[in-house]
Amino acid sequence: MSSHCSPVKKYFHKDILFSLTKILTPVSEGYKMVFFQSGIFSFVYWNAVFTKYVTPSFEESVVMQPLTEYSQKALRKIRFVLTDIDDTLTENGLLPAASYQALERLQKAGKKVIPITGRPAGWCDHIARMWPVDGIVGENGAFYFVYDRGKRKMKRRFWKTENERAADRKRPGMLRKHILAAVEGCAVASDQTYREADLAIDFCEDVPALPKASVEQIVSLFEKAGAVAKVSSIHVNGWFGNYDKLAMTRILLEEVFQTDIDQAQDQIIFCGDSPNDTPMFSFFENSVGVANVLDYEDELEHQPTWLTTKPASSGFVELAAAILDAHSNA
């Protein structure tokens, strides 16, 4: 969807019948209004779904569609399930058993399951070894890890060389002090010790939630220092380098699974919830937002194609069930 889109919410109570319509305002007004409604479905999260957008003329509006309308034929083609972790697989800081079971069931069904996360290298080593996954991209694209259980060997592929990473680790020192002094209430993330490539500033994981203006100030301070900054549901992550989640995902699938993501769009699905997932939402046609992605609807430059009815872990379980149902009906 265009970054110019400005969503306007229209609320519906559960189980209301509505049909597809499009209403276009005169082109002379400089905008076209596209109004989408379809099917009978229940939105558990807020009992609502936003369905109206105002976009500049001549640009096509893309509206998040309910996952219930995703065709089984398309779902049967999925080979790779890529997913964010925080507030996508997790809920209230915990990994529910249902999420772990969903990952396990997907893998047993032959799907390649790969978390794409902002979490640190130390966590990713554990996840690659002990979760039912086929690899992991961590620190917003700084690396991928793939564990070969047969050979008991971990493959670690970093975007930067060891010397470059060592130099980068020295750079955030003053920046860290500057951010902590300038933005009241923020803190260095508790998982910073286990990071290889970035600086993570906590704005709501282990500190009282900061206002949006404070989060934006953290981003601004990173960017003024020449760093890339991305906002997750809990941290602002800053790093020096021209990579992101999508860039390392491309390398992982090419090097490990001999898959060109440009040619395999219909075989890959991504699920996420927040602004640092934007590169994935913008690239993958089969992108899915768990319902709490609506918390960031005004901040996403690109929105996912599909929307689950439930938030966080429950939304991912909903997506996994849809994929597995399509697989079993093949």
Image: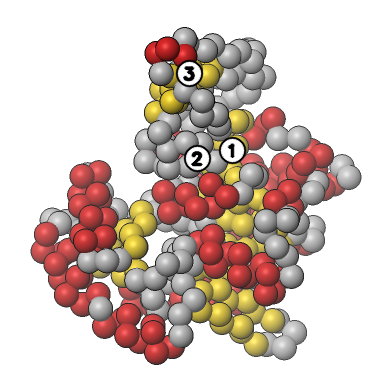
Furthest-front residue in this view = 28
Q: CA distance from mark 2 to mark 1?
A: 7 Å
Q: Quadrant of residue 221?
A: bottom left
Image position of 79 with respect to 308: above or below:
below
Q: CA distance from mark 1 to mark 3?
A: 20 Å
Marked residue nearer the N-terminal end (2 or 3): 3
Circle 3 residues within 10 Å: few <14, some 14–19, many ≥20: many
Q: Which residue is mark 2?
A: 303
- Dot 3: element: strand
In percent of width and height, residue 207 lies at 24, 57
Q: Which residue is mark 3?
A: 32
* Kind of residue indicated by mark 2: Gln
Q: Tell me the crowding category of disc 2: few under 14, some 14 to 19, or many 20 or more residues within 10 angstroms, Cα based.
A: many
Q: Quadrant of residue 219?
A: bottom left
- Image point 47% across, 23% down: which residue? 57
Relative to 219, 234 lies left or right: right
From the top left corner, tell me how far across and down residue 74 is, in percent.
77, 41
* Residue at 67% across, 67% down: 253
Label 2, label 3: how many angstroms apart (C-alpha)?
Answer: 18 Å
Helix or strand or loop: what does disc 1 sit on? Answer: loop
Pick the front one: 150 or 93? 150
- Is residue 134 at least partly visible in the picture? no
The quadrant of the picture occupied by the C terminus is top right
Q: Camera-side residue: 227 or 134?
A: 227
Asked if residue 208 is positioned above or below residue 253 in the image, the reply reads above
Amino acid type, mark 3: Lys
The residue under the point 43% across, 48% down is 274
In this rendering, does residue 162 appear at all? Answer: yes
